[in-house]
Image (spheres, rainbow, N blue to C red):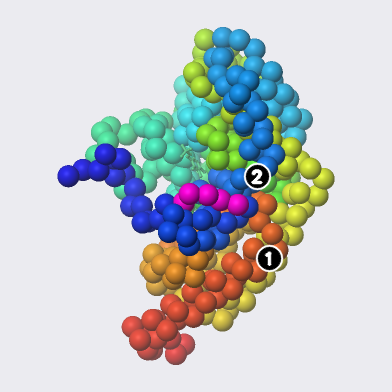
Amino acid sequence: MIPALMPTYNRADLAFERGDGAWLYAQDGRRFLDFGAGIATSSLGHGHPQLVAAIAEQAARVMHVSNLYRVPQAERLAARLVAASFADSVFFCNSGAEANEGMVKMIRKTMAETGRAERHRIICFDGAFHGRTLAMLAATGNAKYLAGFGPVVEGFDHVPFNNMNALRDAIGPATAGIIVEPVQGEGGVRPADLQFLRELRAACDEFGLLLGMDEIQCGMGRTGKLFAHEWAGITPDVMSLAKGIGGGFPMGAILAREAVARHLTPGTHGTTFGGNPLACAAGNAVLDVLLAPGFLAGVDRRGRALWQALEAVVRDYPTVFTGLRGAGLMLGLVCRPPQAEVQQALLAEGLLAVNAGENVVRLVPPLIVTDADCASAVAMIRAAAARCAEIAKVAAPGLAAQ
Ligand SMILES: *Cc1c(COP(=O)(O)O)cnc(C)c1O
């Protein structure tokens, strides 16, 4: 019989009843170090006092009023995001896919309103992940996710990631823009080359296209800068955010330059829940922490230290790991055995991680993770690697001897 909760996920048989910082406590009393952070979402970890207080206080005052009225919490959050970014204006919504849908609508609308209505197509990249709505399935372009869901929404072209020649070849008279993840998350924690990002910006300027960035996973401090594109020294025209923006409270946002945002006039786009007082109270509390002096520098420092420690683990266990990739606190261990086996071993050590494409184990801890937490994680990964290496030795003696 089908479970009452629709079985769209292969869930681990674990239920958490409480969390504290980077740690989660299961109903059966076991505790786990959370290097998955609810898929790069619980940016302040669990039970963060500032976030908890902000949500509780706002919930007691007023949670939702609709966008028929002014929402001071949303005005404040938007102004702060504008001040901290390339953007001139912000639209709030409730999820990543919804933010990306809005981003595509903004790109198309801008073209339509500036006499270029024939330009409606968006170039996306192999290995991308943009969400599960019908249009975002098309933007993602993964055959496995598209199967069975009917005609693919028109208007998305795919080219290899980090390949400028292929990108230039794909630009045609109907191209409106490009959407790129500065660090692909689901696709396997694959960072874009910084030079590639700069050349994307240059190509958009050359051909009059709009550059959209999906920073739903890599944005909001995850790479050690507030937004990942800052590492390349360039700015997009429009950007989507979600995941970490609410610290676990469901929220998405679209940040845009005025030249794009001004085409979204009253009645052209909307959402009932988007930017309600409760969500924006959470967003403001997250931003308070992220923008506090030294916080992002700490993320950067811990990310680099974690990288160094993991590089040594990868070097010591070549039969288990073949590489390390990522940026900041968004790291991927490329596995030799099926990543599910490695994750099983990590779980046995008490570490939660997330899978990603290309047989990668994704490590995306809360940004408030401590040095001691990172040291614990590395010890657990080392122990899990030793466990997997033993198994690999038995399964493939030749490989283990390499
Ligand atoms: C998670 C994710 C999405 C989809 O976000 P949802 O909130 O699940 O709709 C889109 N793009 C990227 C890069 C993501 O990581």
Q: Which residue is mark 2?
A: 48
Of marks 1 and 2, which one's residue comes earlier in the chain?
2
Q: Can residue 115 be seen by looking at this rendering?
A: no
- Mark pair 1, 2: CA separation: 18 Å
Residue 372, which numbered label? 1
Name the one closer to the observer, 105 or 251: 251
Q: Amino acid at mark 1?
A: Ala
The residue carrying mark 2 has its beta carbon less than 8 Å from ligand 1: no
Task: Look at the picture and state if 71 lies above or below 100.
Answer: above
Classify residue 356 as left or right of residue 191.
left
In the image, residue 167 lies at what x, y percent?
Answer: 52, 45
* Residue 328, image quadrant: bottom right
Q: Is residue 19 magenta?
A: yes
In the image, residue 108 lies at what x, y percent?
Answer: 51, 23
Residue shown at 74% from the left, 29% from the top:
80
In the image, residue 55 lies at what x, y percent?
Answer: 62, 32
Say which element carries label 2: loop
Residue 116, which numbered label? none
Task: Look at the picture and state if 139 lies above or below 89.
Answer: below
Looking at the magenta stretch, what is its main secondary structure? strand
Residue shown at 49% from the left, 70% from the top:
349
Q: Can residue 243 be seen by looking at this rendering?
A: yes
Mark 2, Cα crowd under 10 Å, few <14 / some 14-19 / many 20+, is some
* Residue 52, image quadrant: top right
Residue shown at 42% from the left, 42% from the top:
140
Q: Amino acid at mark 2?
A: His
Magenta part of the protein: which range? 16-20
Q: Is residue 47 magenta?
A: no
Residue shown at 62% from the left, 31% from the top:
56
